[in-house]
Image (cartoon, rainbow, N blue to C red):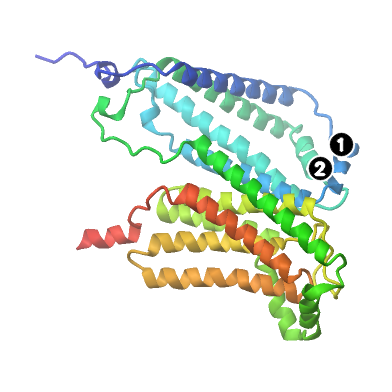
Amino acid sequence: MTAPAALPAVETTPGLRPPSRPVRAWLLTQAGIYALAASAAVERAITTTTPIARADVDPLTSVPGIRELLLVVGLVFAGVGTILAWRGVGFPRRRDLLAAPARLRPAVHRLGQVGAVTRGVMFLLPGLLLVIEAWTYRRGSFGRVSQDVRVTLQQPWGRLLLAAAALGLAAFAAYELAAAAYRREPPDDHAVGLAPSKPLVRPLWTVALILLGGAAGLWGGLVVLGHAVEAASPTSGRGPDQAVVAWLAGHRTSTLNQLSAVGSAMADTMTCITVTAVAAVVFAIWLGRWRESAVLVLTVTGQLFIFLLVTATVHRLRPAVAHLDPAPPTSSFPSGHTGAAVALYGCVAVIVLRELRRHHRHWGAALATLFVVIPLAVGSSRMYRGMHFPTDVLAGATAGAGWLALVVAVVLLPHPAPAPVAGRRVKART
């Protein structure tokens, strides 16, 4: 005799419950947000967009550090969009909302998959647009790329792209509505016979408060130090700082000029962005998770924001020697190149050491040593090229090292590192 068809597993498993009110409210809020975004995309597709007025974008060109800020924001949006789109491609089956009718589940899953990919793309494209704006930034030119994109979207194929985006966002809104109705959650892991998950060491809001407090402390300490250094040498032609830079300028050679140019370029804005992006992708592929990549991006972007805040408060003149590089409008204190080098290459060194310490200790130590030497070369090059005083370099290194230590201690170390992939393979063979 044929057994009757079994009900969905989620309906017969004891202990399952609907989502809590805050979770359901969040799902419904997301559905509303994406529905509004879809309607806005439809409106853009059927109406004429007014080009960006030059008066609306010119004031931004006088803001110090606006190019770096655009790069950071664009990188963050592009990174988040890439992660969301990648996760959308492999939209997990476990989120099929098994409480839904069996015939409806495949359609709900497909809606979620299409909508998740569209959501990621809608984060990725503005991020790339900001990066291009910053890359092509010139005084009085910000907004031209955005204006060209808006004009392009008014072409027939551009309107089709907007309509496709509207459909994708509407699909995700429908999925969130279905999630609010059909999602079921166990009260804990034991209710469904699963192994208990390890609790987080700290709640997310606690981590955010610690990082914000640490950043504020670093900013305050550097501002006090910067004003003290500025008061001790009120002009750029006095003090031992100037003597060191003047001595280096007096011993310049063509070979050292070329070497210092390479050293300084290793912490240029575009170099740091490129290295950060490549390293984040390498870590994600190598380790099979995004935590280390997120730590790297958080370290680099956080250090940049601290640097911009300090330079907006301290206004120290640059050394009174011939400058071998164009002098940016920011203050000489602290050295942004040195801070970025310490944060970026120091973070890479920490992650490499952490992951290779078990099976490839010597390789890890060699690579970490190389990454630690790079900030020393960057700081020396900036002083040699007449761009910073020694105290500027020390302050930049302090800012980068302080923020790196805080992020590693609060975000990375509380999560033990699993055995590296290579180590697991070797162990499996034996």
Q: Which mark is residue 78?
A: none
Residue at screen point 58% across, 52% down: 299
User: Where does the image place residue 273, in percent across and percent down from the top left?
Assistant: 64, 56
Give the secondary structure at mark 1. helix
Q: Nearer the viewer, residue 324 or 162?
A: 324
Residue at screen point 88% across, 67% down: 235
- The quadrant of the rendering that contains the N terminus is top left
Looking at the image, the residue that sits furthest to the left is 1
From this view, report whether residue 312 is shown above or below residue 262.
above
Amino acid tagged 2? Gly
Circle 2/circle 1 CB separation < 8 Å: yes
| Mark 1 residue crowding within 10 angstroms, few (<14) / some (14–19) / many (20+) | few
Q: Nearer the viewer, mark 2 or mark 1?
A: 1
| Mark 2 residue crowding within 10 angstroms, few (<14) / some (14–19) / many (20+) | many
Give the secondary structure at mark 2. loop
User: Where does the image place residue 136, in percent across and percent down from the top left?
Assistant: 78, 53
Q: Nearer the viewer, residue 423 or 144?
A: 423
User: Where does the image place residue 227, in percent across and percent down from the top left?
Assistant: 78, 57
Q: Which mark is residue 56?
A: 1
User: Where does the image place residue 116, in percent across and percent down from the top left?
Assistant: 51, 32
Question: Is 350 left, or right, of 66 in this rendering?
Answer: left
Instruction: Measure the C-alpha gap from mark 2 to mark 1.
Output: 9 Å
Amino acid tagged 1? Asp
Q: Earlier in the sequence, mark 2 or mark 1?
A: 1
Task: Report which quarter residue 428 is drawn in.
Answer: bottom left
Looking at the image, the residue that sits furthest to the right is 55
- The quadrant of the rendering that contains the C terminus is bottom left
Question: Is 237 left, or right, of 379 in this rendering?
Answer: right
Q: Nearer the viewer, residue 7 or 257?
A: 257
Residue at screen point 41% across, 41% down: 201
Q: Which residue is mark 2?
A: 143
